Amino acid sequence: MNHPKILIKQTKDELLKFSPREQKRGEILHFILSKINRLTDLNHLEQITTQALAYFGGRTENWDLAKEFIVPIQTVLNQPCLQTILVKPSQVFSERTILWPNQTEFEVLRPDKVILTESVACVLEFKSEYQEEYFPSQQTQLKKYMKVIAKLFPQPVRGYLIYILSNKIIEIKTTWVPSK
């Protein structure tokens, strides 16, 4: 019996252009954002940030918590397009692995966050800063996630690339309709 291969694509080209401190900040931001599932979680952002630093072995005195984490996260997540999603989600999936069939192999996908509401399924992909050269590959990645989510859930799918330190949100439009 032939079993499909599992395909894990790990391209770290983007990371090569960032300093170790910038890479660590990106990891910490992702950890913090994985713990925020609704707007009310922002009330605990300082505690979550401190936990994230401890998890990654960092010391709070080495970082400007407000400038590098708390204020940028609060600012971007309080934008109107995200507020409606984060006010009352039905279900939230953070960093969940999806094993998806792709012709003769399985592909491992891991969207940063999938939020289900009664009317929509939202795929959120977090990035530290907007850099135009990486946008096409980031858009392709998000569209792939959206296509898979459209097959898994009955709601229409919306996707957002969220650049925390740039305070920029780009909604990615698709023509996919949910599976019946």
Image (spheres, grey):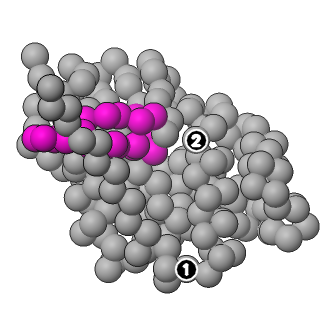
Element type at mark 1:
loop
Mark closest to the chain's N terminus, 2 or 1: 1
Quadrant where the C terminus sits is: top left
Start-end of magenta stretch: 96-114
Quarter-of-image position of residue 65: bottom right
Q: Nearer the viewer, residue 116 or 4?
A: 4
Q: Mark 2 points at which residue?
A: 34
Tell me what residue is drawn at x 22 percent, y 50 percent. 143
Residue 171 seen: no
Tell me what residue is drawn at x 45 percent, y 34 percent. 96
Percent position of residue 128, x then y? 53, 65
**Going by the image, does 160 lie left or right of 19?**
left
Residue at the extreme right: 61
Circle number at residue 18: 1
The three-letter amino acid code for the residue at tag 2 is Ser
Q: Which of 133 and 116 is in front in this view?
A: 133
Percent position of residue 140, x then y? 23, 58
The three-letter amino acid code for the residue at tag 1 is Phe
Q: In the figure, 114 relative to 170: above or below?
A: above
